[in-house]
Image (tube, helix red, strand yellow):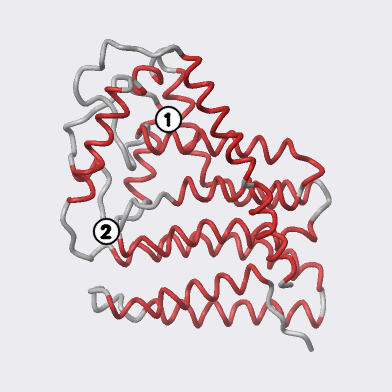
Amino acid sequence: MNLRLRSAEWLLVIYFGYVAAIAPRFPLQPQIAWRPFLVELLVCALFLALAYGESREHSEIFSIVRDWVTVALLLLAYREMDWFSSTPHTFDLELRWVEWDRTILHRWALQRAIEALGYLGPAMLELCYALVYAIAPFLVAVLYFQRRRERVNGALFLYLLGTLLAYALFPYFPSDPPRVAFGGTDMPNVITALRELNLWLVGNYGIHSSVFPSAHVSSAFSAAWAFFAFLPERKRYGWGMLAYAVGVAVATYTGATTMQRTLGRESPSAWFPPLRFFWLAAFVFAAFLNCLEALFAALGALGGALD
């Protein structure tokens, strides 16, 4: 009987163990302090039960279930970070970010560039942000569709590595989004239905412990590296996800959802750079990221080698 865990499963076990280890160092509420330890035990038991089932009978069914349980537990990892929301903090980080916002959004006219075409630019960024929650299922589904299910574990390992590293830092950077820290003071010039949807999502189902670093951005880029590393014969998926990740990064910074940044502070600067400047910047940025592809492909191969 072989109860060997997959590398992606080990990564989740290590992550939940890490959260349980650091929990006593933070002022968690008494009714919550014990929960990280219980989560670690339950996750270990679940993975061992699935591994046992796969080794006994209906191995293919259990193997598929293990693919999707790994994806589902990412939501638990995200929600677990909300238990650290009781950590006291000042608004030092938020006040620094506001200054950066004013420089990039107004002095450099990024806000005006985004809103130059009316609803189109903000709506596209809002859509990028909303679709972040479907990245992990999309990653697995594409590999299934391409008949490369044997690569799912390695791809998930690389995807989880980038995403969980962001989650792991949340307790050390307690912060609030501008909609909480500076509620009602900074509104965008363009309001879309997708913006209202995103505000509803982050307001009702988001976490309140930290907004830095951005797990949305790290997860999107990690999915791109996973496609490059584990579906190299279909590079269009990697390039498509990379372009989408750039969109998520812009959406996250400019604050199309006010999750981490806000739009519309003072009157925009009269100076408006040509749009080709932004296309050139995006091209240079993408080229730089492509140079890192080999490094992340090696990390992905390491994940597969651990199986």
Which residue is pictured at 31% across the width and 64% down the height?
A: 172
Q: Position of residue 136 (x, y in %)?
A: 60, 51
The type of residue carrying mark 1 is: Leu
* Picture layout, residue 120 above or below residue 93: above
The type of residue carrying mark 2 is: Pro
Picture quarter with the C terminus:
bottom right
Which residue is pictured at 50% across the width and 50% down the height?
A: 218
- Give the residue at the far bottom of this rendering: 1
- Label 1 neighbourhood size at 10 Å, few (<14), some (14-19), many (20+)? some
* Mark earlier in primary sequence (1, 2): 2
Q: Position of residue 236 (x, y in %)?
A: 73, 35
In-image side of 124 versus 170 (left or right):
right
- Label 2 neighbourhood size at 10 Å, few (<14), some (14-19), many (20+)? many
Which residue is pictured at 65% across the width and 54% down the height?
A: 295
Foreground pick, 180 / 266: 266
User: Which marked residue is nearer to the observer: mark 1 or mark 2?
Assistant: 2
Mark drawn on residue 194: 1
Which residue is pictured at 31% across the width and 55% down the height?
A: 210
| Mark 2, secondary structure of its residue | loop
The span from disc 1 to disc 2 (Cα, nearest Å) is: 27 Å
Q: Position of residue 179 (x, y in %)?
A: 24, 40
Picture quarter with the N terminus:
bottom right
How many discs mark residues in the rendered view? 2
In-image side of 21 versus 31 (left or right):
right
Q: Which residue bears the numbered disc 2?
A: 174
